[in-house]
Structure formats: C-alpha cells, structure tokens
Amino acid sequence: MAKIIIAGGGTGGHIFPAVAIANALKQLEPATEILFVGAKGKMEMEKVPQAGYRIEGLDIAGFNRASLLSNIGLPFKLIKSFFQVRTIFQSFKPDACIGVGGYSTFPVLKLAQQKGIPTFIHESNSFAGKSNILLGKKATKVFTGTSNMEQFFPAAKIQVTGNPVRASIAHNRPTKQTAVTAFGLDANKPTILAIGGSLGARSINAALAAGLNAIEAAGVQLIWQTGKTTAAQFKEQAAGRSNIWCDAFINQMEQAYAAADVVISRAGAMSVAELCVVAKPAIFVPFPHAAEDHQTVNAMHLVSQGAALLVKDAEASDKLVSTALSLVKDASRCAALQEKIAALAITDADVVVAKSILHYLKK
C-alpha cells in the first residue's frame, strides 16, 4: 500500500487538479493512503476535507509585494514550516510526494528530496513558478499541462499530460434545462456565465456591475461568480434582478457550465482546461499581472486557433459586456468556437498522472 502526500493549494487552480489526481490514485489503487498538506487559512483547508481527504496545515505564507514590511516574518515561517513537515513525515512516512503549486509545495518536496523520497510535480501553467523550477532539478518526474517546457525543467523528466479536470466536470453533463433551473433562471433565455476565480476578478466584476442594465435590456441572464473578496458589494448590486444569479463561489461548476451559452473567464490554466472539456464559447480576460503574463499566453494558445475570444483586462470596462452580448446572440459564431475549443480537450490527465506515479512506485 502506497502512502502519498499531495502538497499545494491557495487557489482552485491548484486544489481541484490535486483532488482529481488523488481520486484517480484511489480509483486505480483503492488501498493508496493519501494525505494533503496545505497552508493554514487558505482555501485548501476547507475544500480538501469537503472532497473527503485529510489535510495538515502549515504556518507558511508567500512574499507580499504590496506590503514589504509584512514579509519580515517570512524566514521564520519558512523555518517553522520545515519543522512541521518533518513532524508530518515522521508520523505519515510517505512513499512519494506530489506538488501541485502553492505555498506548501516547496517545504514538503524539498524535505522529501533531502530524504530521498520520490517527488512528482504537476505544473499546470505555460510558465513555471520559481519554486517548481528549483524543485524540478531533483524531481523524479515533472508533469506539465503544455508542451515546450524544457526551458524550465530537465527534458528527460518532463511528461506532457495536460491538466487534470475535476471528474464532476469531465464526466458529468447535466442538461441545460436542469442546470439553468438549479440557478433559479429561465431555461429559454440565453445565459452568460462569468467566473473570475475563487478570489474574484476586479475588472470582470466592475464591467458586469456597470453593464447590468444592458444585460437585462438584451433579455440575457447572468450567472455571476464574484469571488469572495468583494462578494457583498456585487450581490447588493444584483439584488432584485430576476435575470441574475450572483454569489461568491459556485460549488457545482458542472451545473454552471451546462447552463451557460457563453462563458467569461480569467485564463488560468485550469479554467482553460475546463472550458476545453465542456466545449463552451469563451471570452478570456487574462489577469495581466500573472507571472510572465502567462494567462495571456494561455488564452492566446486558443485564440490563435479560433477557439476563443480575448478582451484585454484594461479594455474590459469598455468592451466586455458588449462583446459577450454580441456573441451570445450569434449562434453560428458560438457553434464555430465550440467546435474548435472541443478539439483541444484533454479528459484523462488525472489518470495519466496517477498511472505514471503508481508505475514508478511499483518498480
């Protein structure tokens, strides 16, 4: 029986692929024992137990570029986290560790490498994070969401798998009627889904808030995930409008995707992967401050193939709502985008990653 630690989190883009890999490991080898390690106070401490897995939290945080003074305690937190990881290792005795990105990945995989425990990395983005680049040098294998990652990792260690998509999204397809009704909306009206990520997207939210009257006048519905940061403000603005469902977070994303005729989204690697799988006409608004502007790279990979549209973050206030309303009323253009984006879907990345890890451990 293999005992495996999965480390990482911070956002849904790290947590949901990690859970998908864990589920695939358990499906292939039910006796596999899995422990998650995350950062205290972060999203994984809630979402991982909801998925049925045990998680240990570390006292660790990332570098705060906005407030340099708040970084004074970082070295102490990092040192403390290494002691916490050491205690977890002594208790759990892992046979392998998997890192998916996020604050807890570095101390867990670093200690595993020092102890000679096999380490596996999944890098979802087209530009690798600094921690993953450092860890990749001694990793057993690096799974990547995209090709051409040799500039970041040793070529011999790379296996291009695509990005693991939640099984509930990859294999569960509710009807539009059922899905729209679940949000209390009208199944006969065109519906736009807006997802800015678990923390929200300021430009998307501001553009939608300013365009609520235009959306209503067009006879269009909106399923609006605001993110938790400013949810209260936007829920207040949406209150009383029968054509809008608005909340901080959507727990059943398979229902939201099924309900949507058009999706507005950031261009994080996992959002892109999910939209390919559900084959929805998409308008990407890449977050411009992502490392190496990798969200624009992610989006352009689809846009250049005629598989999606792009609105720049700085132009969202002027163009986003009008672009979305134009698209949702253009059936032939929606159909063309759907055909192109569906061709880019990868539905079995979680199983490919899990099989590769288990095969290595059985050697």
Image (cartoon, grey):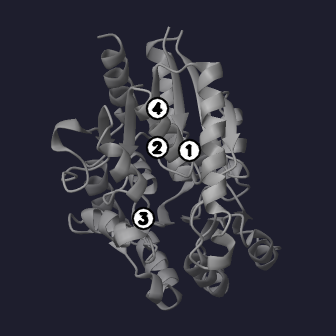
Task: Of the two numbered discs 4 and 1 on the same chain, state the one appearing first in sequence.
Answer: 1
Q: Which mark is residue 112?
A: 4
Q: Nearer the viewer, mark 4 or mark 2?
A: 4
Task: Of the two numbered discs 3 and 4 on the same chain, state the one appearing first in sequence.
Answer: 4
Kind of residue at badge 4: Ala
Kind of residue at badge 3: Ala
Q: Quadrant of residue 55?
A: top right
Q: How many marks?
A: 4
Determine the CA span between mark 3 and mark 4: 32 Å
Instruction: Find disc 1 in the rendering and name its residue.
Output: 15
Is residue 276 toward the left or the right of residue 109 in the image? left
Kind of residue at badge 1: Ile
Instruction: Tell me, yes or no, whether the two marked residues, 3 and 2, touch with CB atoms within 8 Å.
Output: no
Kind of residue at badge 2: Val
Q: Nearer the viewer, residue 184 or 154?
A: 154
Determine the CA span between mark 1 and mark 2: 8 Å
Instruction: Tell me, yes or no, whether the two marked residues, 1 and 2, touch with CB atoms within 8 Å.
Output: yes
Q: Position of residue 178 (x, y in %)?
A: 63, 43
- Secondary structure beneath dot 4 equals helix
Task: Of the two numbered discs 4 and 2 on the same chain, state the one appearing first in sequence.
Answer: 2
Q: Is residue 231 above or below residue 203?
A: above
Determine the CA span between mark 3 and mark 2: 18 Å
Instruction: Find disc 3 in the rendering and name its residue.
Output: 267
- Secondary structure beneath dot 1 equals helix
Determine the CA span between mark 3 and mark 1: 16 Å
| Picture residue at 49% right of the left edge, 34% below the top | 20
Is residue 22 toward the left or the right of residue 310 in the image? right
Q: Position of residue 114 (x, y in %)?
A: 43, 33
Q: Which mark is residue 100?
A: 2
Q: Nearer the viewer, mark 4 or mark 1?
A: 4
